[in-house]
Image: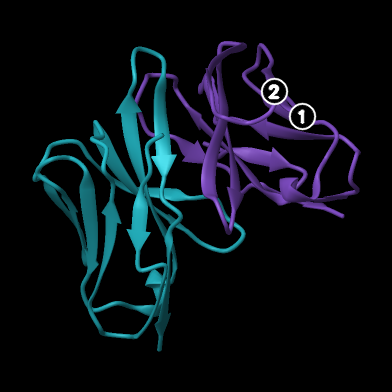
Amino acid sequence: KAGVTQTPRYLIKTRGQQVTLSCSPISGHRSVSWYQQTPGQGLQFLFEYFSETQRNKGNFPGRFSGRQFSNSRSEMNVSTLELGDSALYLCASSLGVVGETQYFGPGTRLLVL
Amino acid sequence: TQLLEQSPQFLSIQEGENLTVYCNSSSVFSSLQWYRQEPGEGPVLLVTVVTGGEVKKLKRLTFQFGDARKDSSLHITAAQPGDTGLYLCAGGDRGGGSNYKLTFGKGTLLTVNP
């Protein structure tokens, strides 16, 4: 069974631009969670989508948004990029049962100049 | 806001040595997970502990959940270069129904030198 895939793997943007990241979960998984990882703050939860609905949300500004499609693939969008948005963005998928194991993708490394 | 403090932040040891990594919080968690992350990859789950006082062993790795479910430790015996990586602990909180969240510590970066 294929693992979680994320595209693109690397991205360079400039301040003020917007970016869209994509995540394809493991086949059969209906939950996708997004995390931001930085050296200073570690891994921080952004949001979770389950069956095309946002089920849970972290403490990030509204510039960070996401959506999930009927095939469970998910996208994350960051508008008006800031230098501090440079990070590794990870998505994780699971079947959707609360508390069960999440499987992480390799991440998208975003650099904002 | 729940916080998980991991210590030490960095650890560099020689092959064959033993080590312990700690994960502490002032909050109670319903479960505690340990992950290992290698460069260029996402975290991979090593173990989940759910009962206070629980001890789990995975080959040379021993995981313990504190009696009060606020802290955990990871002990590695006879470390090998393949153990090198970022070790993350994550606390699970059943805030209510679908509001289950994982709170991650900042990690311990372990380097095992041959």
Nearer to the camera, A41 or A54? A41
Residue A36 sits above or below residue A55 on the image? below
What kind of residue is marked 2? Gly
Considering depth in this image, is A41 or B112 the residue closer to the camera? A41
Q: Within 10 angstroms of label 2, few (less than 14), some, or many (20 or more) residues?
A: many
Left or right: B58 with respect to A82?
left
Residue A58 sits in quarter? top right
Disc ID at residue A105: none
At numbered mark 1, what does the secondary structure look like: helix, strand or loop? strand
Q: Chain of mark 2?
A: A
Q: Are marks 1 and 2 on the same chain?
A: yes
Q: Is residue B47 shown to the viewer in this render?
A: yes
Quarter of the view holding residue A20: top right
Q: Colour of chain A?
A: purple
Q: Residue at (91%, 48%) from the top-left corner?
A: A14
Percent position (x, y) of residue A98?
A: 37, 20
Task: From the rendered image, report the letter of the chain displayed in cyan.
Answer: B
For residue A77, the mark is 1
- Tag 2 residue: A66
- Callouts 1 and 2 close, C-beta under 8 Å: yes
**Which residue sits at x=55%, y=51%?**
A41
- Snapshot quadrant of residue B67: top left
Which x, y percent locates residue A55? 52, 15
* Residue located 56% across and 11% down the image: A51
Q: Amino acid at mark 1?
A: Asn
Quadrant placement of the C terminus of chain A: bottom right
Q: Residue at x 35, y 12 (%)?
A: B97
Horizontal and vertical percent position of residue A28: 51, 21
Under circle 2, the secondary element is strand
